[in-house]
Amino acid sequence: MDRRAFLGRSATVMASMGLTQLLHQDGKLFSSMQGSELAIDPIRPIIDPASPHAPRPVHFDAKAKQVLMIFCSGAVSHLDTFDYKPELWRRHGEPMPGSDGLITFQGEQGNLNRSPWNFRPRGQSGKMTSDLLPHIGSLADDLCFIHSLTSETNTHGPGENFMCTGFTLDGFPSIGAWTTYALGSETDSLPAYVAIPDPRGTPQSSVNCWGPGFLPAAFQGTDFHANQPIRNLKLPTGLSPQNDQRTRNFLNALNRHQLKTHPGESELAARISSYELAARMQLSVPEVSDLSQEPDHIKAFYGIDAPGSDSNTKDLRSAYARNCILARRLIEKGVRFVQLFNGAYQTGGEGVSNWDGHKTLEKQYQLHGQVLDQPTAALIQDLKQRGLLEHTLVVWCTEFGRMPTFQKGASGRDHNPKGFTAFMAGAGVQAPYSHGATDPFGYQATEKVVTTHDFHATLLHLVGLDHRRLSVYHNGIERRLTNVHGTVIRELLES
């Protein structure tokens, strides 16, 4: 900005401040906003510090009681999975119209590139999905696709933050934290919110994806996976269960005496509650994570021992399949929000451990597709067969999409936040249904464009929460998951 532009903009700002003061004096500042969401009062959940996860009432009748969010880290390409673009196939190898000089995240773009995988019609609906994920595709009649989702960033860490928290910066509450803060839990022996990281590691934005931000720490997601239960849960060597119980009883007596001596100490009550939950988890977590109780046909259904193209693929799929079974068991036990991750960030791993297919998309996605496909499809089918989908909302998402072109000098797709796909299944959503669309090449959303804030508003609506009223006053601002944006996507809702 040069000196002339700086002075001009400064004058505009000063004039605007003066106009605001005059409108305020005349009582006209918000007159055009009567009845808007600015006039909606927040609904504060009443939380007992001694029982922060006790069930709390919804804002209105809920379609779903629990949420299972499956998050694929690394930005899954919609063009190689669920967004079929015949024009992309017809124009394969040609420059994308209007893309002259287009520079994206990693640089200049090459020509249009069709998917290495064929698309086929699936189910009674005939939904076209890719052969990369045939098992998930076979469930097309049970899925509600959103093909016009958009993001505000093209960078992985901020993108993961944005999808999980509604903000690109660190330090904001995750959607699971917001949900359990508002609703509590349906179980008193397990955490209200469980995050199941990929066995290979965490997403790029790490614990921000399941953190509590400025909400009370009780609403942070508890992270563990099937191959590694919660850390420090087992008794120390040499301590018998009897002595452990006596120690906890004595500690509880001291805590109760202290609480009685200092009534109203909410932090003390909250700490006692967390200790008591930890004690109950010593019994409940080993039980829920013990997959030896699962019959062989269920393990085979999820693909734990299914053959892979190589031993590495088989091992990765087996580990992810175990996490999928764990997710189902947690839903069965009443955990309010389960966040299951597929793909992890590793420094120097250039797309090896997640869906970040910049350089060799076909090779990388062949691995990731085999890991994701059968276990995820089995999880959704298993929930349905057990009647759990009647009150559980399943959400599959990623941080943003991919370009219809290949990067110059590479065989992969660059980041693209202008249009990508997510899907929902289960309680409260239409299926089969496809909402919105990207342009003929899949570059940007053009029909019924959906922002991430709209996506979050709809998810909260399905669990009985008004996203405009679920807020927390923090540092002088009413903060909410959807910031000051978001509209519920009514077309997605089951009639």
Image: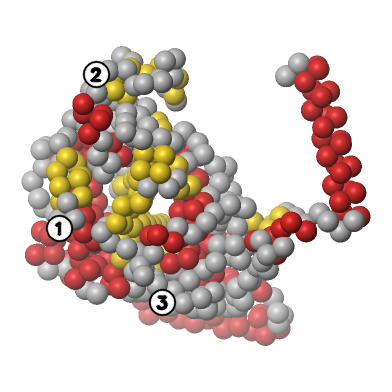
Q: Amino acid at mark 2?
A: Gly
In the rendered view, tell whether residue 471 sits above or below residue 190. above
| Label 3 element class | loop
Distance from label 3 to label 1 (Cα)?
A: 38 Å
| Residue 416, placed above or below residue 395 | above
Q: Residue 416, relative to residue 339: is it above or below?
A: above
Front-most of residues 490 and 133? 490
Question: Residue beneath label 3, please?
Answer: 187
Instruction: Place residue 140 in its image quadrant.
Output: bottom left
In the drawing, does residue 129 fall left or right of residue 274? left
Q: Which of the image's four quarters has the N terminus?
A: top right
Q: Which residue is mark 2?
A: 93
Q: As shown in the figure, which amino acid type bears the numbered disc 3?
A: Thr
Q: Amino acid at mark 1?
A: Gln
Of the 4 image quadrants, the one containing the C terminus is bottom left
Q: Position of residue 287 (x, y in %)?
A: 28, 71
User: In front: mark 3 or mark 1?
Assistant: 1
Nearest to the eye among marks 3 and 2: give it: 2
Which quadrant holds residue 231?
bottom left
Q: Quadrant of residue 313?
A: top left
Q: Residues within 10 Å of mark 2 (few under 14, many from 20)?
A: some
Report the residue at 83% width, 56% height from top: 28
The residue sitting at 55% across, 62% down in the picture is: 467
Q: Tell me the residue at 21%/28% (across/down).
A: 89
| SS at mark 2 in the image | loop
Residue on which the image places disc 1: 124
Disc 1 crowd rating (10 Å Cα; few below 14, some 14-19, many 20+) is: few
- Residue 25, horizontal then vertical, whole percent: 91, 55
**Label 3 neighbour load within 10 Å: few <14, some 14-19, many 20+:** some
